[in-house]
Amino acid sequence: MIIIGELINASREAIKAAIESQDSAAIQKVAQDQARAGADYMDVNAGIFLDQEPEYLKWLVRMVQTATDKPCAIDSPNPAVIEAAVMVHQGTPLINSISLEKERFDRLLPFVAGTDFKVIALCMSDEGMPQTVDDRLRIADKLVGGLLNNNVKVENIFVDPLVQPLSVNNSYGLAFIDAMEKILDNYPGIHTACGVSNISYGLPARKYLNHIFMTMAISKGLDGAIINPLDRRLMAGIIAAEALAGRDDFCMNYLKAFREGLFEG
Ligand code: THG
């Protein structure tokens, strides 16, 4: 499972404040905490700052990379902002994300063509959010086809079928999971990823829904997640689910997590 730490996101009050006051130590601490907790990538998002988004996102990349050895997941709907942040990034970033929205697709496709960047392909188009499994599959086919035709390796693509709130439509949980399964079948070697917390939007006790949804998705092949790695129960659940899904040889990761005390408390 590839863990993408979600906490360095300006939609969170503490991060917004740290960015505004250019508090390096505060951002570096969140980066180090997430790295220590097992994040493989550090999502960075400054999307709430419209004019200053590029400057602030570049600063976040530098903060993460001076504090940890983890690469960033560059998270913006604006392709120009993604390009600016990638330019200051050392090593191989994860692009979060390309979508089928025309502006995003047309600009990011040549940018990622032939590179070793990891790319999240978000199932969204100019027609808005996908509703059904078929909507998701149609978008995924065009995204993956475009990326493969532009020499992005299948193993560097993470399709995000887009998690939508169960409170809006009770088919959204399974629509995500069914689409994900079919995408994994259609493109051997491809990865999937999602931000899990959208599933519980508008409902109480969100953590329960998030945790169980995560487990259900892992059982069907989910191998990338944008989550809070400081949530120990969630991390413990992920490790148990991966072992149960047959993706942890000799339960090595499970045993290691146990020895490290992840299942205590
Ligand atoms: N797909 C892709 N990228 C994404 C999303 C997605 N990027 C943004 C978002 N969705 C995922 N990132 C976040 C970041 C913060 C929060 C939720 C999703 C959040 N965190 C809690 C808070 O601040 O209250 C803290 C979490 C906790 O304590 O458990 O709200 O879907 N490709």
Image: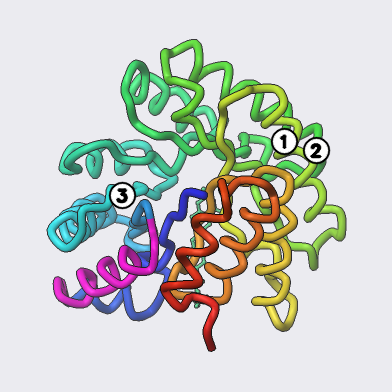
User: What residue did someone put label 1 on?
Assistant: 136
Kindly tell me whether mark 1's CB lies below 8 Å from ligand 1: no
- Magenta-drawn stretch, dominant element (helix, strand or loop): helix
Q: Position of residue 202 (x, y in %)?
A: 72, 74
| SS assignment at label 3 | strand
Disc number at residue 72? 3
Q: Residue at x 33, y 59 (%)?
A: 46
Residue furthest to the front in view is 250
Q: Residue at x 61, y 60 (%)?
A: 196
- Which range of residues does the magenta coloring cover? 22-39
Residue 126 falls in image quadrant: top right
Sequence-first tag of 3 and 1: 3
Sequence-first tag of 3 and 2: 3
Residue 132 part of the magenta segment: no
User: From the viewer's perspective, is 186 left or right of 250?
Assistant: right
The residues bearing labels 3 and 1 have C-alpha atoms spaced at a distance of 26 Å
Residue furthest to the bottom in view is 265
Q: Position of residue 74 (x, y in %)?
A: 34, 47
Residue 178 falls in image quadrant: top right
Disc number at residue 133? 2
Q: Are marks 2 and 1 in contact (CB under 8 Å)?
A: yes
Q: Residue at x 57, y 55 (%)?
A: 251
- Disc 3 residue type (three-letter): Cys
